[in-house]
Image (tube, helix red, strand yellow):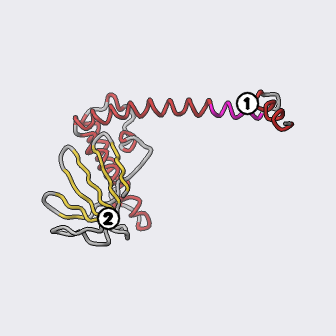
Amino acid sequence: MAAQIISRADQITLNLSFKPNYSRKAPLPNNISNISFSSQVTKSRISLKTPSGSCITRSTTWLKVLPAPIESDETLYEVLKITDPENATALDIKKAYKRMKKKYHPKVAPRNKVGKYTKWFMRVHEAYLTLSDPEKRALYDKDFAEIERQREWKMRCRAQLDKLKLRTRDPNSWAAMMRSVSSFT
């Protein structure tokens, strides 16, 4: 059995993957390879994924098929094209959402880009749901600040590693001398 926990500002997801080999009062179908439980502030759901990729979701009141979550390197503010996140008001977020909703709604998409527009529309809607709720927005902003600190740290480390790699290519560097000494022994 494999387990994966994904944490974001607005939800925590636990994914368990296994081949069920036991029976219960209501046994799971044999073709289910992935069970995902997702809990948010407002609702909880359980997703059952088959090897073919279809997804059945059980909520407290309904069953429905849910698309996979959309992953992106863009922040939710960038998705809504909000240039000043710190000073954005609820009205600014709503206006940005309406503008992006009109741009990416699947009904206005060219025929060859309906899938792409649908994904973007869902991403825009996800951004609006998070940023329009003051509690979720506060959590997102707090987590976003931490992610930005980690991203800056990671970029500094990469820059240092790149400098070290460049230095080791220099024939007069200490590493080059050590390599030449060790090649003689």
Nearer to me, 56 or 77 = 56
* SS type, badge 1: helix
Any magenta on residue 82? no
The range drawn in magenta is 161-169
Which residue is most to the left?
Answer: 61
Q: Which quarter of the image is occupied by the C terminus?
A: top right
Q: Amino acid at mark 2?
A: Lys
Q: Is residue 156 left or right of residue 132?
A: right
Residue at x 19% of width, y 67% of height: 24
Q: Amino acid at mark 1?
A: Arg
Residue 50, relative to residue 35: is it above or below? below
Q: Position of residue 88 (x, y in %)?
A: 31, 32
Q: Looking at the rendering, which quadrant does residue 176 occupy?
A: top right
Residue at x 36% of width, y 50% of height: 4
Q: Position of residue 44 (x, y in %)?
A: 20, 51
How packed mark 1 is, by other alpha carbons closer than 10 Å (few <14, some 14-19, many 20 or more), is some
Any magenta on residue 162? yes
Q: Pointer 1: what residue?
A: 167
Q: Pointer 2: what residue?
A: 49
Q: State which tag comes first along the sequence, 2 or 1.
A: 2
How packed mark 2 is, by other alpha carbons closer than 10 Å (few <14, some 14-19, many 20 or more), is some
Secondary structure mainly formed by the magenta segment: helix
Which residue is most to the bottom?
Answer: 30
Nearer to me, 6 or 182 = 182
**Which mark is drawn over residue 85?**
none
Q: Position of residue 107 (x, y in %)?
A: 32, 62
Q: Position of residue 33 (x, y in %)?
A: 34, 65
Q: Is residue 79 left or right of residue 48?
A: right
Q: Which quarter of the image is occupied by the N terminus?
A: bottom left
Q: Looking at the rendering, which quadrant does residue 157 occupy?
A: top right
